[in-house]
Structures are given as C-alpha cells and as structure tokens.
Image (tube, rainbow, N blue to C red):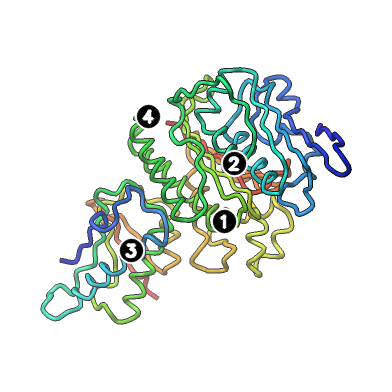
Amino acid sequence: MSTLRVNDVLKDKVLVSRESAHLLEDALGALMENVKSPGAGACKTPVTLDFEGVGGVAPSFLDELISIFESFVEAGAYSGERCLLVANPPMRLSLKFEALARGHRMTIRVQPDGSWRLTVAES
Amino acid sequence: MPVFVPRGFMAMKLTIKPDSKTFQKTKSFRHVADLPLRFDRLDPRDQDFKWAEVDIDLRECNFVLPSAALWCVVYLALASHRGADCRLLVPLNTGVCVYLKSLGLFDSLKTFRVAVDDRDIGSGHSDKTILPITPFKTTADAAGVTNAAFTGLQSAGVGAANLTSVVTELLSELALNAAQHSESAVGAFACVQCFKSDDRGERFICTVADGGMGVRESLYRNASLRERVSYDWDALELAVRERVSGTGDPQRGIGLYGVSEDVRRPGRSLLLHSGQGSLEIKEDLQSSARRTRLFPGTLAFLSIPT
C-alpha cells in the first residue's frame, strides 16, 4: 500500500497548522520507505494522501506536508514516482493551491476521480 | 470627539464614542471610520499611551457590527494592558445588549479586567452566532478556533454544504496570520456569524482581529520589501500579492493571497484594516487601498453569501 489515510493520524476535522502537518511525518516517512524497499513492486506507484473524513485543509498545512514529502525525496528515502496524489480533497482546487504547488516547483492537476496529482515540474 | 477630563495631577480620562455623520443618521457602529478623527493619535500600543481611564461609550448604538465589536475588544484590552482602568458603556437598547452578550463581547472584555455593566441582560443564545468572540494566541489555538467554527457551521445547518469548508479555510488563514505575525500583547480574536439583511441577503461574516504590530511592520521585517511599505495602505496592497511575506521565505506568502483570490467571487468581500490603512477586495474590485482611521493592530472582515 502506498496510501496514508490522514484521518487515521489526525483527528481534527479541519487541518490548519504547519505543526500539525509534522504529526504525519513519521507515517509518511514509513510509507515512502515501504515504497522504496525491494519487493514492494510498486516503485512507480505514487504516494497517496487520502483526506477522506477531513472537513477542510488550510493551504499552510498542505504546504508543509509537501515540504515534508520533498525532504524525504531529497534525502534519498524514496525512489518511487516523484509525484503526490491527494485523494478525496475536501476543498476545491483554487488559484491558491496552484500557487502553493508552484512554490515547490510542482504542477497540480485534478484527476477524473477528483483527486489531485502534484507532479514535480520538468526543469 | 474624545473627551479629556483632567483627573488628579497627571491622570486623564479618555471617552470614545462613535460620532460620524453616518452614525448620527443610523446609530449603527460599523467600524472605526465612525470614530472621531482626533482619536487616530491615541494608539494604545504606544508606550506613551498613559491614560488613567478609558471609556468606550456605546449607549447610543442601535446596531454594532462584529468589526466594531472587535475594535472595542482590542482597544480596551490594549488600554487595560497599558494600565488604564477601562469601561464599556453598553447600549441602552436592550436588544442590542442581548445580541452583544450572545456575541461574547462582554465576557471577552471582562477577561481583560474591563468593567461592563450588563446587569439584567439575558444570556439567550443567538442563532446568528456560529462562533462567539474567541481569543487565541498560538497557531494551535488558531486551529482550535477554526475547528470550533467548523463544528458550529455544521450544526447551524446554514448555507450550501461546500461553504462550510470554504468559510473554515478562509478563517484558518486569517487566524494563522494573526497568530504567526501579529506579536499582539493581547492576543487575537475571532468570531463567525450568519447575518440576514434586506439588501444583501443571508451571509456568513467572519471577523479576525489582533492588537499587534500590523501588516506594514510585519512586511518591513523583510529587508527586500522595506522600500515598498512606506504606509499602512501600500503594505496592505502588497500583502495580498502572491509570495509576499514578512518572513522572507520564498515559499511563504500564500495565506492572504489565497484569501484575496477566494473572495473574488460573486457577492463575497474582504475588508482588511491595519493601522491607518484599509483595503477592500470584491469580485469586481481589484484593489481599493485607502487611508482611514487607526485600528491598533489588524482586522479582517470577510463576508460570504450563503
């Protein structure tokens, strides 16, 4: 599995602060390590953050979560696809989230199933 | 006009009451623009604010908007913090008093040792109040305020379902800004209400205020912005642009930009007021920063139709 159910770790209905994003750090790190390990067989499977059950997400929270993802990638702890899926986002994709992705040199697209795909932009 | 009453050797009493032409017509206290001009020099954040007594007189008011109510909280909390004996003279109109009590104005002030004579005012809950005036200081508090508003919005059952996340998302960013950047000696305050008016219909009103350094001072801390923030009003214009932040971190500065983009939709509006500057953003209004009366800190007033 390469999916982290955010609501399993964070019980708040609305996820707001950068500090609370860090409460997902261990779970996200373990997930990315799992994707990297031999035999996982899913190195091309992007990591998915599933927000089912979450009522709202502040940009600051998501921004910090992406930074944590990036730090794992940069540390070599992950060799899967360099993109992040946001499943069941409780909010509409708006300009601010696109701006947030740009800040990480990522693009953000809505998938047919409503999830968001954040991909590292080609340099 | 402020009333200066000598009391003893150096002690003075300051009485502030709304007094604009609009106020005289409507008896509605909407925001600090309804206050006398001289009051701009009486900033309770200043070290030299040495009034022994400060009264805010709302006795004539027949309506008080949350933006004005939060000004009362911030001003009196700051004045009390400076050592003044503070008092709120509540409206003579009992209905307005009941509303202000349900909004949490009186209890908020009492926590700052402000005297409020609210005797015999019922404590009935108002359906209008989703989140009463709630103090917060840290980002964790801001998260708590946001989640309390989310719960209140869900139980109120007002407006389209998707608006709950929109309102809480916007509130969260405004509250985070106050917690992270204001360095307010008296913390910050938020409230959410659902208003119905004849001319604008039913709307969510979110108000966040702090008694901190203000947007200009916050941006001034970023050396690369110093030349561009000569006044409160041009600091506000800059603050709502993408990636503008007092932190200097190139990945920050999405909060106010995001809020301002989200309010550029039919019927929505955002009023930011910091120091002597204010900025209003609407769907059809790119920017209207102006010089106005002093708010000792920063206030954000968000309006979203249900």
Mark 1: amino acid: Arg
First in sequence: mark 2 vs mark 1: 1
Question: What chain does badge 4 belong to?
Answer: B
Task: Locate the N terminus of chain A and report the quarter of the image it occupies.
Answer: bottom left
Mark 1, residue position: B241
How many marks overall? 4
Q: Nearer the viewer, mark 2 or mark 4?
A: 4
Question: Upstream in the sequence, badge 2 or badge 4?
Answer: 4
Q: Position of residue A40 (x, y in %)?
A: 13, 75
Q: Nearer the viewer, mark 3 or mark 2?
A: 3
Q: Earlier in the sequence, mark 4 or mark 1?
A: 4
Same chain shared by disc 2 and disc 4: yes
Q: Are marks 3 and 4 on the same chain?
A: no
Q: Position of residue A103 (x, y in %)?
A: 45, 66
From the top left corner, tell me how far across and down residue A86 is, in percent: 28, 58
| Chain under disc 1 | B
Of the two numbered discs 4 and 1 in the rendering, the one whose residue sits closer to the viewer:
4
The residue singled out by tag 4 in the image is B158
CB atoms of marks 1 and 3 within 8 Å: no
Q: Which mark is residue A23?
A: 3
Q: Give B105 or B237, whichever is nearer the viewer.
A: B105
The span from disc 2 to disc 4 (Cα, nearest Å) is 23 Å
Other residues around mark 1 within 10 Å, as few (<14) / some (14–19) / many (≥20): some
Tell me if I can see residue A14 in this picture.
Answer: yes
